[in-house]
Image: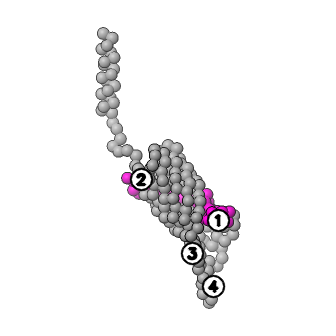
Amino acid sequence: MKFLPILSFVTAASALALFAPTEAHADPVASIGGYVQPQIPIGNFSDGTSFGLGLQVGADIAVAPNVAIVGGLGVTNYFTKAEGLTLLNVPVSGGVRYAFDKLNHGPYVGGGLDINILHSSFEVDGLGSVSDTNAKLGLGVGGGYRLDAFDFGGRLQSLDIGHFGDSLQLGLYAGYHFAEF
């Protein structure tokens, strides 16, 4: 007699577990997105530039439940304070992101290295122009919040590790992940 209630409970629990609704797919392993990135120069860097505006295409690939390898390619135009001066940055970035909840939903922190291809040109009316392009290794740390396809955050970065304090900026970003795999 005592066996029948136990058997009934086990049968009902098994039926619920077997027929309970489940998610149709697992969390995505990788995603590709686009970002708008306003850049605010800090310190000596702000002496020559007032503001930067960048666009970037980025990707992330999960390597553990809360860890992803991230990378991107972009371009940033800086609004300079000197007449005739143009400054562009083409960052090729790579790093790691740690999510506190899920990779595609919740807060996260991260850091990485960038190869910054910096191009400057200076034009003087009637005299011509001069330009220079250099590749510099940069470093950045930051964090943000991912809300499914939307991604918002900030990053403190140096465009040139060799001149760390002279190339600091606060980068903000808003992005949309348009493909997940």
Mark 1 or 2, which is nearer the eye?
Answer: 1
Tags 4 and 2 touching, CB below 8 Å? no
Residue 146 visible, this angle: yes
Residue 23, image quadrant: top left
Closer to the chain start, of discs 2 and 3, is: 2
Q: Tell me which numbered mark, 1 or 4, is placed earlier along the sequence.
A: 4
Q: Earlier in the sequence, mark 4 or mark 3?
A: 4
Identify which amino acid the numbered label 3 is placed on: Thr
Q: Which residues are magenta?
A: 156-181
Q: Nearer the viewer, mark 2 or mark 3?
A: 3
Which numbered mark, 4 or 2, is in the foreground of this view? 2
Residue at the farthest top position: 1
Q: Could you tell me the amino acid type at mark 4? A: Val
Residue 30, which numbered label?
A: 2
Q: Residue at x 56, y 67 (%)?
A: 116
Between the residue at mark 1 and the residue at mark 3, the CA separation in whole angstroms equals 16 Å
Q: Earlier in the sequence, mark 1 or mark 3?
A: 3
> Pointer 4: what residue?
124
